[in-house]
Image: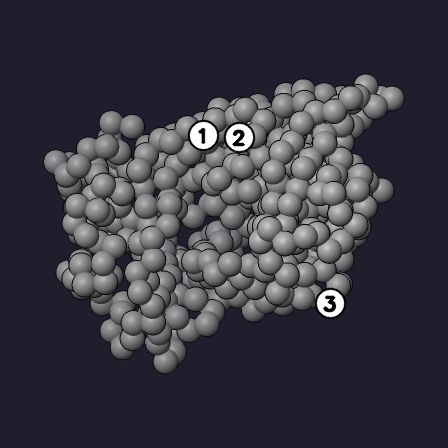
């Protein structure tokens, strides 16, 4: 473990690992290190170790093949034996279902994945390409130090073990330097906020999800149903479970007590269509609440730093593009860092233009999709979406 790196990435999730892989593809001679708060309890064959928290099941759109091939991880992904998604069945704009079968997609089928396995796959690939990992490590402070001979700034970072135990590796004094830093800390945007960026929240959406167990997977389609207080989402998982999620606003959930097991179950089994997908399923968990609101940073990049993945901005789960965005942004970020070091774009102007255009396009699509739902115009959740 060294003290000085060319590039330091904070966060070992999908966005951070994908960025590390993309950077090693573009700049193989540059040293890259990932810093992550997770403890040292999962080993991989390269000798690096990291922990991945339990995460909700995910559905990847068919076009995810593009960034995966760009990153060079497509074959490894296929080896995970993810569950093919046969399409989407949605009760959205009317009481009749709208079916979008994957057979009509130019990219083939989408995928239901085990998120933890997917995260481990990316981390293993990153470590195998020469990326270093500091686990159980928290970023305390970051400041720009004096410039080097090329007149580019050097970042000095103060680190500590996340469990507050003494460092057991070379960083006995908890300090490190890097020529470029990347925020991949997810919704917290911890690094970017230390550099002065501020989070902007555009709605109050939360997801309340619960797992169900079935003896076999009968229907691998994604199911969506709009209701007066939000919408429901359900997808099969490779484990044989099915995840069911209620998407609503935080205050609506609180007022109706949807976070409690009884109220969640009552609302679920009052749905006209989605509840039919759960015949023969057994409850496998309590309801779990997670943030799902759209947010973005007011500043996505600056001299010698950028934010990527959910640290930069988040998408409404209705889009099913969260992980696709993280992988695609990782590739674009690697181009931006390459241009930065070559002197072609020292202020990362192209990256910021791309990211802003990506978010603007997402907002347009979000308005379009929510405007298609006209059955519950007088309900607070839908009034807010029309006004956005």
Give the quarter of the image for residue 275.
bottom left
In the image, 217 versus 347, the foreground residue is 347
Q: Residue furthest left?
A: 378
The residue wearing badge 3 is 45
Residue pointed to by mark 1: 199
Q: Earlier in the sequence, mark 1 or mark 3?
A: 3
Q: Earlier in the sequence, mark 2 or mark 3?
A: 3
Picture coordinates of residue 200, whole percent (x, y): 41, 28
User: Element under label 1?
Assistant: strand
Question: Where does residue 281 sit, x and y in percent of width and height?
Answer: 29, 74
Q: Secondary structure at mark 3?
A: loop
Crowding around mark 3 (Cα neighbors within 10 Å: few <14, some 14 to 19, many 20+) is few
Q: Nearer the viewer, residue 67 or 137?
A: 137
Contact flag, marks 1 and 2 (Cβ < 8 Å) = yes
In the image, is 234 to the left or to the right of 310?
Answer: left
Q: Residues within 10 Å of mark 1 (few under 14, many from 20)?
A: some
Residue lying at the far bottom in this picture: please name it. Answer: 215
Q: Nearer the viewer, residue 253 or 328?
A: 253
Seen from this angle, which residue lies furthest right? 149
Q: CA distance from mark 2 to mark 3?
A: 35 Å
Residue where numbered disc 2 is placed: 193
* Residue 196: quadrant of the picture: top right
Residue 123's tag is: none
N-terminal label among 1 and 2:
2
Q: Alpha-carbon distance for marks 1 and 3?
A: 38 Å
Give the CA separation, mark 1 to mark 2: 8 Å
Residue 19, percent from left and from top: 66, 43
In percent of the image, x 33 and y 50: which residue is there?
207
Quick check: can you spot residue 266? yes
Badge 2: how crowded within 10 Å, few (<14), some, or many (20+)?
A: some
Callout 2: SS = helix
């Amino acid at each position: 473990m060294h003290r000085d790196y060319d590039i330091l990435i904070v966060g070992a999730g999908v966005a951070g690992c994908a960025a590390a892989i993309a950077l090693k593809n573009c700049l193989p001679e540059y040293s890259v290190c990932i810093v992550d708060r997770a403890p040292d309890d999962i080993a991989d064959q390269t000798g690096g170790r990291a922990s991945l928290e339990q995460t909700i099941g995910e559905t990847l759109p068919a076009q995810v093949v593009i960034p995966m091939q760009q990153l060079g991880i497509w074959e490894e992904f296929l080896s995970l034996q993810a569950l093919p998604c046969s399409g989407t069945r949605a009760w959205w704009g009317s009481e009749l279902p709208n079916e979008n079968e994957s057979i009509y997609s130019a990219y083939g089928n989408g995928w239901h994945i085990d998120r933890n396995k997917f995260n481990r796959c990316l981390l293993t690939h990153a470590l195998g390409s020469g990326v270093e990992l500091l686990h159980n490590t928290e970023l305390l402070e970051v400041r720009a130090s004096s410039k080097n001979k090329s007149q580019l700034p050097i970042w000095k970072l103060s680190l500590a073990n996340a469990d507050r135990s003494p460092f057991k590796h070379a960083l006995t004094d908890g300090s490190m330097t890097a020529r470029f830093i990347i925020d991949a800390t997810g919704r917290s945007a911890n690094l970017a906020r230390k550099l002065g960026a501020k989070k902007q929240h555009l709605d109050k959406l939360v997801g309340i999800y619960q797992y169900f167990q079935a003896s076999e997977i009968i229907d691998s389609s994604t199911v969506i149903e709009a209701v007066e207080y939000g919408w429901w989402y359900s997808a099969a998982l490779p484990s044989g479970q099915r995840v069911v999620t209620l998407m609503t606003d935080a205050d609506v959930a609180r007022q109706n007590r949807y976070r409690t097991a009884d109220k969640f179950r009552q609302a679920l089994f009052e749905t006209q269509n989605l509840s039919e997908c759960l015949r023969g399923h057994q409850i496998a968990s309590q309801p779990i609440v997670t943030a799902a609101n759209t947010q973005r940073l007011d500043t996505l990049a600056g001299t010698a730093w950028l934010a990527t993945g959910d640290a930069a901005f988040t998408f409404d789960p209705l889009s099913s593009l969260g992980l696709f965005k993280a992988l695609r942004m990782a590739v674009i970020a690697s181009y931006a860092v390459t241009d930065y070091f070559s002197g072609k774009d020292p202020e990362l102007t192209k990256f910021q233009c791309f990211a802003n255009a990506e978010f603007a396009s997402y907002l347009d699509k979000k308005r379009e999709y929510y405007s298609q739902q006209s059955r519950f115009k007088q309900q607070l959740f839908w009034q807010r979406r029309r006004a956005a």
